[in-house]
Image (cartoon, rainbow, N blue to C red):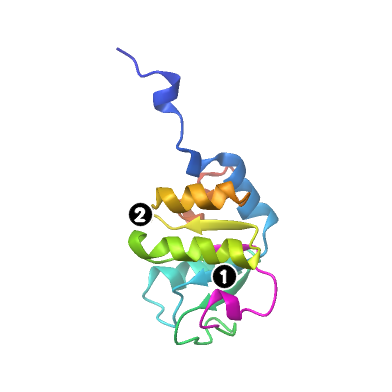
Amino acid sequence: MAPSAEDLALPQWLDPENIRFLLDDCQTWAVVGLSGNPNRTAYRIAQMLQDRGKRIVPVHPEAPTVLGETGYATLADVPFAVDVVDVFRRSEAAGEFADQAVAIGARGVWFQLGVVDHDAFRRTTDAGVPMVMDTCPAIEWGRRRP
């Protein structure tokens, strides 16, 4: 028996329109968990975001300057508007950053590949903030046609 259209549908957190909005319409990306270690995925993705013309904002408890951008210990410490909060934390720790993103007025939240928190997704989208989970901007840009 062939799968139904509902079975083949993407999860709500992979809504193509939300992905397009975050990638195309949002410029300032706070990267939670970004340190100065170039061997970490967060560093490589932040660098790719910069290469795509995005401003990155490192958010890390040690608040290092990374890729030429001043770091902040928390999202609340960032003194300017943030469009997207991109979270590089384990699923069990990520939800608090979605809540903080809503609190600072971010336009969207992105949980990286492997990071899933259904309750955080519900809270964030119930607050009217689009959220993408369990994928990476590099993957999503790679899926686009040239």
Say which amino acid is labelled 2. Answer: Gly
- Please tell me whether residue 79 belongs to the stretch shown in magenta: yes
Q: Position of residue 111 (x, y in %)?
A: 46, 57
The quadrant of the rendering that contains the C terminus is top right
Q: Residue at x 46, y 34 (%)?
A: 10
Q: Where is residue 64 in the image (x, y as percent from the top left)?
A: 49, 87
Q: Eyeballing the image, is 69 above or below 125?
A: below
Of residues 103 and 71, the one drawn nearer to the viewer in this rendering? 103
Whichever of labels 2 and 1 marks the residue nearer the N terminus, that label is: 1
Q: Position of residue 104 (x, y in %)?
A: 63, 68
- Residue located beneath label 1 in the image: 30
Q: Do the residues labelled 2 and 1 touch (CB within 8 Å)?
A: no
Which disc, if any, is residue 114? 2
Secondary element type, mark 2 = loop
Q: Can residue 54 be seen in this view?
A: no
Say which amino acid is labelled 1. Answer: Ala
Q: Eyeballing the image, is 69 above or below 40?
A: below
Which segment is the magenta one? Answer: 72-85
